[in-house]
């Protein structure tokens, strides 16, 4: 059965139920599962594992590419299966358990996990659970809508469970390019010099004897939960397009710009959508995730080629792209995240990177992960991989959150993921701060004047002015650096109290005391 | 005259006085000068420029490789010549002007400056001032004890001033390897796959018509100001050697370890000295600066080869190495800092990086630059280049400073240069925290128990314990996160007040209020 999907006949006898496959996973094991930003996750074994845990409690370390869909992280967290989780997640239930200290979460650069596994600095993967569109005649695994860390997991694990998802078109074969850096000490250059280049195999090469189980599924990926562009994200896109036009006029960029990277989520997706009506053409992408905007740009004839590690699309776009995958395959490639996020390739290609800041301070330091400085949102993801090695590192955010009660621009970020060294451009709906070549005191004026919401601008300027009286390369008043965060925690707003504001808007900024 | 040093006869007529050469520098220009961690800086033109400024005030943007010796930054700062300075410095007078906001200092990753110049994102270099051992028959410039950014400055600048330093042996020729990434959009892999490999030219290729002046000097580099190893740095070296031995036993490292990088300064130098009596052999270095310890390791037969961008040695070692440079040349190469610090090469080679932290927090975030969170010490230097791309990223620091009144381990660092994502190992004289694969709550216990000074351990544990009650991936109490820094600022110590300490050592920790 499913001879077109399991082309190595000898593997036919490994087909079993998800429950039987899940029984291979033992308490204390490290499990590597496919899945990257909701795309290409496994659709059966994780649920069987959760069911089993109800009767037979067990705990595992779960490593993935990035976040999972289909509520897998939620269900595994609720079943108390997760002792440790890395390198990224985006599920509300798991997030709560992480922040309660019940699940140890290792928040990693997405391009580094495999490097640490390969060198034995993380415990080895015992079992890999990988979604596939097919298994080739040689036992090669054809991934589905993401590659992520799947190839490394499958190649390193002692045993591999393959989920063949018949909802995925067999024509996905040929979309992927599976390649890795050669082992040290004789590691060679990664020969990738153009986004469209293929340097590897269209499948994951695995010794078939290590394929311990094959499980059949027929279920779609969870659709993207990015919101459609709105007035503010359109303004952000507009500011960025205007910058690109200035750079082209100055001769620093061609009308094809540089290869684009955009982080997962609503704002980055909207910024790319904004390029549909721009004067730029023959664009390329070298990113970790492709969203609806990528498809829109291809359909509009703007985007020549896109490389990534996953495709995370909304329902209707997802179905259409899968149905027409033969056509889109000439424009797309999915790679291991070690290659999509590799510093060597990123620095060589010279990307324009567009990532979302949770909050940003007046000097351009970015918090990408920790709400209030303490509570994990999703993880740093690829933002550090990309920003650190970018030709032009852009961070985007709306200037306020929670109906204006939180300013995304603060005196000092409560957690630093991407430091001022790695932030060239900051954009909010109010404007754009071009921080290139500026010292911190100069950066502050740009950020406050161009990016902060008017309701917070005076407060930021006042902080900066008073901090300067104490001197320093990066002036701060440590005793009130987090006063806004503390005010939000205690009073539900970063805004100064209205009564005091009427008299002396600045002095009223609540202090730590 | 000096035909052996100026081998292109047509350039003989460009010899002039330092004052005449300095007259080529105009107000408002961007000047790129040789010099990297006190090595290979210019010995005449900077002083002529300062003399001229006394009568004819002018201000420039000064870019170098890294810090300068011979009090150049001091004298230029005192003469008010410096409007902007990048990417690194280590002079007390300049530091004061930077912290007073009088000189705009752009603190950059040392591997990135040239990338930004090349893409036009920093203003172009008008004049390069480069120290040389010789000029070849084709006008090629043979650098001296550092390469730094000299090659890029000389190749990009409209005019080049060369200082021929006859104190430098002509035999330095052949020590350097000048190569760069190919321009985009057709940038190729950097073909460097081994520390000893040479991929470029032994001189800086320059169109001789752009050599506008040649100045003759005869003066040594400033000696290194690293202190000799002491009891505490020997303990740090011992903890690190023990880790390496464990890694070798676990099969994760060979007895040749991986190529070593060590930051400038006393502690990193001492750690390398500690390898002289270790069981490891056939070691290699791929670093940005070579210190005395490198020479000791070569002399001891421990170090097979060392690649860097500069040599910063103490007086006696400096003279001996220069006198015997023919012999040492088979073991050493100096490269442009873009190559010595390039993410592509670093990730490929897989370095053990050893850098110094100014302070570190309980979660492993490192402040490399800002005293009290505000005042610049020297700059991030190469620490971010190396730590971010390391096989094993080590940070070292003494657990206390100022006779114990400052704890180098704090609840929250007051500035983040290297985030917890990029810190694998933290070492103080008290011990070593192995943070690989740990979540922040696990990291905190390691750091507090193994690295903090006993006088501060209870205070850190108490902070951590109370912060945990509020939950979070990275528990903090924002209102007292900087209480220790504030206490030091106000009372000259991070230690709790003795009176209160006798009763309740933990609650007495001074709060922000």
Image (cartoon, coloured by chain):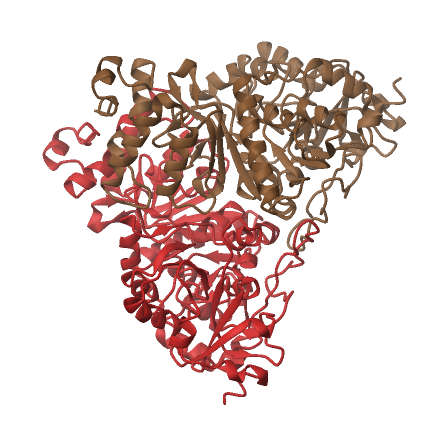
Chain colours: A red, B brown
Q: Position of residue A155 (x, y in %)?
A: 57, 65
- Left or right, B491 with reference to B447: left
In which quadrant is the C terminus of chain A drawn? top left
Tell me: residue B421, above or below residue B17.
below
- Left or right, A291 with reference to A152: left
Query: Which residue is rendered at x = 75% and y = 39% of the image?
Result: B196
- Residues A312 and B315: in front is B315
Can the viewer see residue A155 in this picture? yes
- Residues A92 and B466: in front is B466
Q: Position of residue A410 (x, y in %)?
A: 30, 38
Q: Position of residue A317 (x, y in %)?
A: 40, 75
Outermost residue toward the left in this view: A499
Can the viewer see residue B111 in this picture? no
- Residues A90 and B156: in front is A90
Query: Which residue is rendered at x = 35% and y = 32% of the image?
Result: B412
Q: Position of residue A52 (x, y in %)?
A: 33, 70
Query: Which residue is rendered at x = 74% and y = 28% of the image?
Result: B298
- Residues A332 and B427: in front is B427
Tell me: residue B434, above or below residue A57.
above
């Amino acid at each position: 059965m499913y001879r077109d999907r399991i082309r190595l006949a000898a593997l036919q006898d490994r087909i079993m139920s998800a429950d039987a496959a899940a029984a291979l996973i033992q308490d204390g094991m490290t499990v590597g599962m496919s899945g990257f930003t909701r795309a290409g996750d496994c659709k059966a074994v994780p649920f069987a594992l959760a069911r089993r845990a109800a009767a037979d409690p067990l705990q595992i370390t779960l490593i993935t590419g990035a976040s999972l869909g289909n509520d897998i992280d939620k269900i595994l967290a609720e079943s108390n299966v997760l002792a440790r989780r890395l390198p990224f997640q985006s599920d509300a239930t798991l997030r709560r358990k992480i922040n309660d200290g019940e699940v140890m979460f290792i928040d990693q650069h997405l391009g580094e996990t495999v490097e640490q596994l390969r060198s034995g600095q993380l415990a080895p993967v015992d079992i890999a659970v990988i979604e596939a569109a097919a298994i080739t005649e040689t036992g090669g695994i054809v991934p589905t809508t993401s590659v992520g860390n799947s190839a490394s997991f499958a190649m390193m694990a002692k045993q591999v469970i393959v989920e063949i998802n018949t909802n995925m078109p067999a024509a996905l074969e040929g979309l992927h390019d599976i390649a890795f850096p050669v082992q040290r000490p004789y590691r060679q250059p990664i020969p990738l010099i153009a986004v469209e280049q293929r340097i590897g195999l269209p499948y994951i090469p695995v010794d078939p004897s290590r394929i311990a189980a094959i499980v059949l599924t027929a279920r779609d990926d969870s659709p993207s939960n990015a919101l459609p562009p709105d007035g503010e994200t359109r303004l952000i896109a507009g500011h960025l397009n205007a910058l690109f036009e200035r750079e082209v006029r100055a001769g620093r960029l061609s009308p094809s710009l540089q290869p684009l990277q955009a982080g997962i989520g609503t704002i980055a997706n909207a910024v790319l959508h904004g390029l549909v009506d721009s004067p730029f053409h023959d664009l390329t992408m070298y990113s970790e995730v492709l969203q609806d905007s990528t498809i829109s740009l291809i359909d509009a004839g703007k985007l020549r080629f896109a490389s990534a590690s996953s495709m995370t699309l909304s329902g209707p776009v997802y179905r259409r792209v899968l149905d027409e995958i033969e056509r889109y395959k000439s424009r797309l490639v999915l790679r291991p995240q070690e290659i999509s996020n590799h510093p060597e390739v990123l620095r060589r290609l010279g990307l324009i990177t567009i990532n979302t800041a949770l909050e940003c301070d007046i000097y351009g330091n970015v918090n990408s992960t920790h709400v209030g400085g303490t509570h994990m949102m999703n993880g740093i993801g690829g933002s550090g991989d990309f920003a650190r090695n970018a030709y032009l590192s852009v961070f985007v955010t709306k200037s306020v959150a929670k109906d204006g009660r939180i300013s995304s621009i603060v005196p000092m970020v409560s957690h630093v993921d991407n430091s001022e060294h790695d932030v060239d451009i900051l954009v909010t709906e109010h404007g754009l701060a071009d921080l290139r070549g500026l010292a911190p005191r100069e950066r502050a004026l740009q950020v406050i004047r161009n990016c902060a919401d008017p309701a917070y601008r005076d407060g930021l300027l006042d902080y900066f002015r008073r901090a300067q009286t104490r001197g320093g390369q990066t002036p701060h008043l440590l005793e009130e650096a987090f006063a806004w965060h503390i005010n939000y925690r205690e009073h539900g707003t970063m805004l100064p109290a209205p009564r005091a504001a009427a008299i002396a808007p600045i002095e009223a900024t609540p202090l730590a005391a």
